[in-house]
Image (cartoon, rainbow, N blue to C red):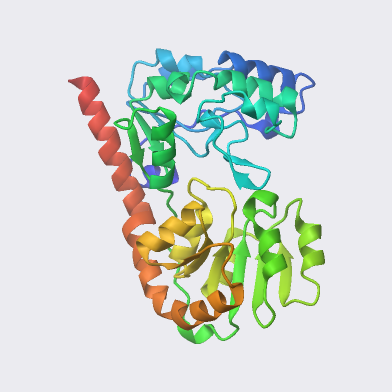
Amino acid sequence: MQALSRAGHEVRLFAARTDDLQSSPLYRLQSAVRVASGRGRSPARAIEAFLPEIVHVHNLFPNFGTRWVMNLRVPVVATLHNFRPICVNGLLLRDGRVCTLCPDGRRFAGVRFACYRDSRLASVPLAWANRAGPSAHPVLARADRIVVGSELALRLYSKAGLDPHKLIVWPNALRGDLDPGREEKLRTRRWLYAGRIGREKGILQLVRRWPPGHHLTVVGEGPDLRACREAAVSKHIEFLGTRERTAVLDLMKTSTGLVFPSICLETFPMVYVEAMAAGLPVMAWEPNVVSEFVASHTTGMAIGWGADVSRALERAEATFPSLRERCRRIFEDHFSESRHVARAEALYSELSAYRGA
């Protein structure tokens, strides 16, 4: 929104925030009904009063209904930030492994395995909403274009039944007023992890495998923090807790590399864009999406969980400094604010012209 506004476009946000609504004693019940039925809170009247040329729908779950989108009379773009239309927990992850049972046709597997909040009851509304597949989802059925963040997400959604002609890859972006790190500052040989400290992120597995002689700084909070601290005893690992984005970017500028050990596939993690903006190469563990990014962009190293971590770090410490300028160029070419605005203007203009004709 800020990028489009700076480019001279009039943008209006219509939002319903969980933080503002969840204090209601009926919030969970009402949310479950909205998710299962698609009916409920709607911004349609406010949107009609605004008279937009384009409506771009992001995350309606769980505070908006979905059926109101079907009645919009202007072009609609929908962005999929996760895998929730094909997976109850939105991660395609179960018991520490990638799971595609639901998109492969077993629509109620998420209920059987209690994939949403470890509760079969809480999983029912989502499984019911997804029972006919993503092409029947009211928002995705109505959308003129469906945005995903990566080729990996495009492949998965196409396989799950979405029309590939509707799908486009539009990656996340970041305002680019950040100087990349300089090589003379990189004497600490410090590696950086920045993200949620939860089981889906793979950080606990990495801490357990972290070799002596290598320094790792962990930024973030989450349910696995205590276990990570226990596994880090006698290792060169420090935990900084939560930090503002500017502080994380400063750490990136003086680190050897970012580690991205997520065991879920991800759609497009913002931390990769931040690393590219800081000129920071990335070591990613397969098969998450960042392992595909570093391979295609030549911005780091992709390894498997069976690899020798110590040897991989040593190789990376020898080669990553030479990749810093490359990372920054990738940011400017693919993830900068100017590229984001150009993609938005091209797509919105195309749809407006098509609908007008």
The residue shown at (48%, 23%) is 133
Q: Is residue 304 left or right of residue 20?
A: left
Q: Quadrant of residue 235?
A: bottom right
Q: Is residue 288 above or below residue 129?
A: below
| Front position in the image: 256 or 6 | 256
Whether residue 150 is visible, yes or no, is no
Question: Where does the image place residue 149, in percent across and percent down from the top left?
Answer: 42, 45
| Front position in the image: 348 or 288 | 288
The residue shown at (54%, 27%) is 60
Q: Is residue 349 left or right of residue 135?
A: left
Q: Is residue 136 above or below residue 272?
A: above
Question: Where does the image place residue 181, in percent across and percent down from the top left?
Answer: 48, 76
Q: Quadrant of residue 72?
A: top left
The residue shown at (47%, 21%) is 137
| Residue lying farthest to the front in this orientation | 306
Q: Quadrant of residue 299?
A: bottom left
Question: Where does the image place residue 233, in percent across and percent down from the top left?
Answer: 81, 72
Instruction: Tell me how many marks there are.
Output: 0
Q: Name the image quarter holding the C terminus.
A: top left
| Front position in the image: 222 or 115 | 115
The residue shown at (56%, 86%) is 187
Question: Where does the image place residue 356, in percent across and percent down from the top left?
Answer: 21, 21
Q: Name the image quarter holding the N terminus.
A: top left
